[in-house]
Amino acid sequence: MQQSKEVVIKAHKKKKIEEYSEVMKHEQQSSNFFKAFIAKPTNIHLDIQDKEENIVLVLRQHLITQVKPTFILLFIIFGIPALLDFSGFLSLFPNDFLQAFNLFWIVLSFGLVTQGFLMWFFNVYIVTDERVIDVDFNSMIHRNISSAKIENIEDVTAKSVGPLSAVFDYGTILIQTAGEKTQFEFEHVPQPAKITKLMNELILEEEREKIEDRVT
């Protein structure tokens, strides 16, 4: 009787991700939270994370996708004041106004830079060994978190458009689910083929666990 209990416990023991995922088997743990592709993070924990749930992958938009917004931001910060100064428009105003304008522009520039960084940094896509999580960061006081269990995922597709995405290896992952939120989009994330393979490995492992539960 004791032996049969041990067999059941062993059958239900949760596997480590490296035991069934070829993708994660070749990935090293990472403690760098400023990357766009963070495999097996060592210093990240979620408030909604279950006790035995392990974070497998944290994703952000590829850094190359931030080049265009950065140039636009630099033009706003430096280009507009330069154009106003070159046109002689600012010379029409008294010095007190110019000092106030410069102070306003410094504060505005700092705010725009901070907002741009926070929008990239906190808009993350998280894959655990139990579910996928989409964190939409809108402001410091508002964020939206959606999640779907791996067992509810019906289809995973990677989509890359344009030569830039092919050169820098990034794309959008489309995840169809049977949950409350029927579609998740991981937009412009690095290594889409690797992510798709990982998702399929997680789905297969979830199906294997269900079969073992029925057998025992």
Image (cartoon, rainbow, N blue to C red):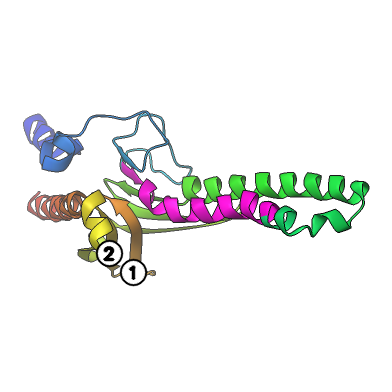
Residue tagged 2: 175
Residue at the spot 92% in from the left edge and 47% down from the top edge: 96
Percent x, y for residue 207?
A: 14, 56
Residue at the spot 71% in from the left edge and 55% down from the top edge: 86
How packed mark 1 is, by other alpha carbons closer than 10 Å (few <14, some 14-19, many 20 or more), is: some
Viewer-closest of 172 and 124: 172
Percent x, y for residue 172?
A: 29, 61
Q: Horizontally, is 114 left or right of 23 in the view?
A: right
Kindly state the secondary structure of the residue where label 2 is placed: strand
Q: Is residue 61 magenta?
A: yes
Viewer-closest of 202 and 197: 197
Q: Amino acid at mark 1?
A: Gln
Q: Horizontally, is 37 left or right of 78 in the view?
A: left
Segment colored magenta: 57-82
Viewer-closest of 187 and 212: 187
Above-or-below relation of 106 to 149? above
Percent x, y for residue 52?
A: 32, 38
Labels in figure, total: 2
Q: Which quadrant is home to the N terminus? A: top left
Residue tagged 1: 183
Q: Are marks 2 and 1 in contact (CB under 8 Å)?
A: yes
Of the image marks 2 and 1, the number of the one nearer the N terminus: 2
**Residue 88 in which image quadrant:** bottom right
